[in-house]
Image: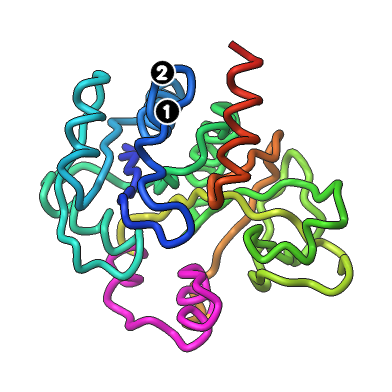
Amino acid sequence: MKTLVLIPSRLSATRLPGKPLLKINGLSIISHVFKIAQKANIGEVFVATEDQDIVDDVKKNGGEAILTSNKHKTGTDRIYEAIKKLGKKDVGLVMNLQGDEPLMNIEDIKNLNRLMIKFQCKIGTLASKIIDEKVLNNENIVKVITKESLDNLNFPLALKFLRKLGKNESHTYHHLGIYCYDLETLNKFVSIKQSHNEIKDKLEQLRAIDNNININVALAKSSPIGVDTKEDFMAIKKIMEYKS
């Protein structure tokens, strides 16, 4: 089954405007993410964006990008337009990798793709163990509660996604910014209007949960920080510059 990897990105993020083009080790965040997706080697990779500056940056750094409308409410709507524009007929799975996760583990991306093919699920995503209790109250870090404990072999269902959690309930994990859809489910997902919970919590995965579309969760090896705030950016910059 063929997989297409799409990375939605835009400059007008509310908490950190212009973040996709912020540079770490001389390369923009969005181009770092593109290169991670490329190294995972699970299928063709494209950035989907409403901004010509992002298209130019990705192409300048050897990547592929496609310009989409600036009217999209969510990243999934954006990647859906990109699929239509690209006209790829033989794709069975679509990997939606968030453009602000430059520390995403390549092995985790490969594993999610493998599990989607093995179990033939509708939507799959990744989550990691929560080590620091402070994460539970940090609304920038999304949590997922799963039906059973995650291990290296299973792919259980997500019961709910939430931003704030008073105490660590059993089977609670840090949700990572990546989804894999089977194409039929993605077609269905974008045809459903945004749910009340999705709008309230600004979590588009709640549209699936609220409409009885199953999401399966795999355990990630690592727990990367996404870039949501200036503090996140400075922390990631420090890690990546130290590694290099």
Q: Which residue is mark 1?
A: 23
Give the magenta part as a residue range: 185-209
Whether residue 111 is situated above or below residue 60 in the rendered picture: below
Q: Residue at x 42, y 62 (%)?
A: 14
Q: Which residue is mark 2?
A: 26
The answer to whether 70 appears left or right of 114 in the picture is left
> Is 99 colored magenta in this rendering?
no
Instruction: Name the chief secondary structure element in magenta.
Output: helix
The answer to whether 153 appears left or right of 61 in the picture is right
Q: Nearer the viewer, residue 5 or 88?
A: 5
In the displayed orientation, state which residue is furthest to the bottom.
196
Q: Nearer the viewer, residue 35 or 188?
A: 35
Q: Nearer the viewer, residue 144 or 93?
A: 144
> Is 193 colored magenta in this rendering?
yes
Residue 79's x, y, as percent?
A: 27, 54
**Which amino acid lies under the numbered mark 1 shown in the image of this protein?**
Lys
State which quarter of the image contains the C terminus.
Answer: top right
* The quarter of the displayed image where residue 45 is located: top left
In the displayed orientation, state which residue is furthest to the top.
244
Q: Residues within 10 Å of mark 2 (few under 14, many from 20)?
A: few
